[in-house]
Amino acid sequence: MERAASFEQKINSNLVSSLDDLNFSIEDLKRKIDLATGRKKVDLVVKNANIVNVFSGEIHKGNVAIADGMFVGFGQTEEYMEYHAQNVIDVQGKFMCPGLVDGHIHLESTFLAPREFCNIVALHGTSAVICDPHEIANVLGLPGIDYFIGSTIGLPVKVYVMMPSCVPATHMETSGAVILDRDIHEYIGSNPDLVIGLAEMMNYPGVISKDNQTLSKLIVGGSRPKDGHAPLLSGKSLDAYVIAGLGSDHECTNLKEAIEKIRKGMHIMIRQGAHEKNLQDLISLINDFNSSHISLVSDDRDVIDLNENGHMDYLVRTAISFGLPPIRAIQMASINTARYFGLKNMGAIAPGFRADFILLDNLESFIISEVFLDGKRIDTHSSGNAGDKIKGVTSDIHVNNKSSPSSLSTLQNTIHTKALDNPNMFTIPKSTKCSTSLLVIGVIPGQIITQKRVIEPKVNEYHSPVADAQRDIAKLAIIERHHRTGNVGLGFVQGLGLQRGAIASSVAHDSHNLVAAGMNDMDMLTAAKHILSIGGGLVVVKDEQVTASLPLPIAGLMSDQSIKSVISNLNAVNEACRKLGNNVIKDPFMLLSFMSLPVIPSLKLTDKGLVDVDKFEFINLWVE
């Protein structure tokens, strides 16, 4: 009687809700067993493959059987030649590698709508991405997350969402929305298979100071993964951050920092983005004992970078070029990431795993010849010129390029500023005290962290500080764009390479207010007005004339156009930007977008003023 009661309890539990569900589960399991034993016909057999095994760390020859979008078995003996299959592919010794997984990326940074993003990364062997949509969430809140979830369901690239933890990111900027602990609890509960954890907790001061709202967000995340974001945090503060439940970090920029974090149990995500490149500095961290606790991630990539270099395949190639053994690099871009996030059926070639794989002629060069997702060959011609990267693939999967017009309409027209009609809005008053020096944001090439630089400014006839081309100092402005507050933060940045004109963007982490940098106020004003007129985007201005722009009407962050169109416009914007100086920094708009991020040391600017990130407080522009 006790055993019967126990069984009845299981049936009525959350695991098996009814006898019908139980019967369905048994029949499903029986089918899987029949497929694995060869009693039922499989969909595909891949013959004569060199299987890259991320579990055993070896390469072994075999034939792989696939059915219902999953691997059902593999081996080298004759029994694996006896599968009844609808299709058989002889790959003639090519390397068969599991699909790649990006453990941390902001899709918005590519400027592509989610479906277009999946189009391009599918060609490069990406089977899954774990995205943090806090960019669109900081503009639109929960409707932005709904858009991400709705527009990616059913795509061959699996898109998982980490629920944004910092909307707004800090109290030192004006955001477009607020996401509370109850919102996080609701979305994780109602979308458990897609919303898989809590995204990067940038507010590490809030964690360490025991802020109730911050801690409650960690608690409602339950036992699911909680990503960290704690640049340069160490010592007892790091101990407190880790003990609060933050399990990963992708912000390590030096070996000492990474060693301390991995010693304290954090999963280290080595970032190799379009602008933030940490792989070379951290490659020596990886050894035989700790590599399973390390992943490769993208964080922020633009569409040109993706198209020219690839996605996770580029990170694997780069890691191999720095001396990492190929199988270890593949593990760090597949099974390591899947295990950290609890994705039990992804990231490997093994029975029961999702049948995502790529074929390569050479493991060291890691140039992909074919891609299969969910057991079907990807059509490389579905994404315009991006398909030119991969040869010899026929069409089985077609990714839907169309987004619902009705859903897009709620995401557009998001730029709401006070009237931009004051020609003096960017004028910085002269010092009212005896100070003659300014704090200037110092760019560090290849990094998003910045320096605090104390510089004696160039001044005009009214003793107001102005841009100085000779010392590569541009004026910087952050204009509030969500609630028409009229907030304008003003400062200076050294290292962009501008000598004339101005650039502006509605992509400015994390609250995405308007950011403008320039060498004169009128060009900056012209640029800001143009951003308003196109509903968000990037713009380059010279002599008060727009020379190039890229409209980003979806929340002011993403284009509603094709990959080909976005690449063309972005190339035009970058070329126009290069004409503004002899040494304009690479990816100027990507770098510009981080100048307003007040959670990355050391000096940043928001719509509310200059922020000393090290002290997490506002600071005067004039040095006292």
Image (cartoon, rainbow, N blue to C red):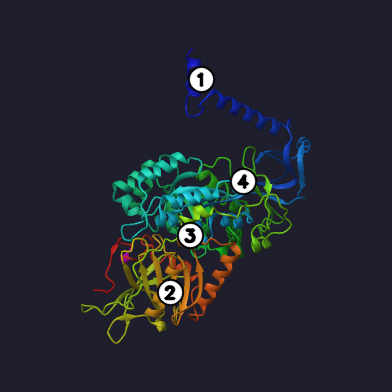
Q: Amino acid at mark 4?
A: Val
Marks 2/3 in contact by CB < 8 Å: the verdict is no
**Magenta residue check for 106:** no
Q: Which quadrant of the figure has residue 319?
A: bottom right
In this view, the residue in front, 357 or 510, is 510
Mark 2–mark 4 distance (CA, rounded to whole Å): 50 Å
The residue identified by callout 1 is: 7
Counting residues from the start of the chain, the first of labels 2 and 4 encountered is 4
Q: Amino acid at mark 1?
A: Phe
In this view, the residue in front, 418 or 351, is 418
The residue identified by callout 4 is: 54
Mark 3–mark 1 distance (CA, rounded to whole Å): 51 Å
Q: Nearer the viewer, mark 2 or mark 4?
A: 2
Q: Nearer the viewer, mark 1 or mark 2?
A: 2
Mark 2–mark 3 distance (CA, rounded to whole Å): 19 Å
**As drawn, 443 above or below 389:** below
Marks 3/1 in contact by CB < 8 Å: the verdict is no
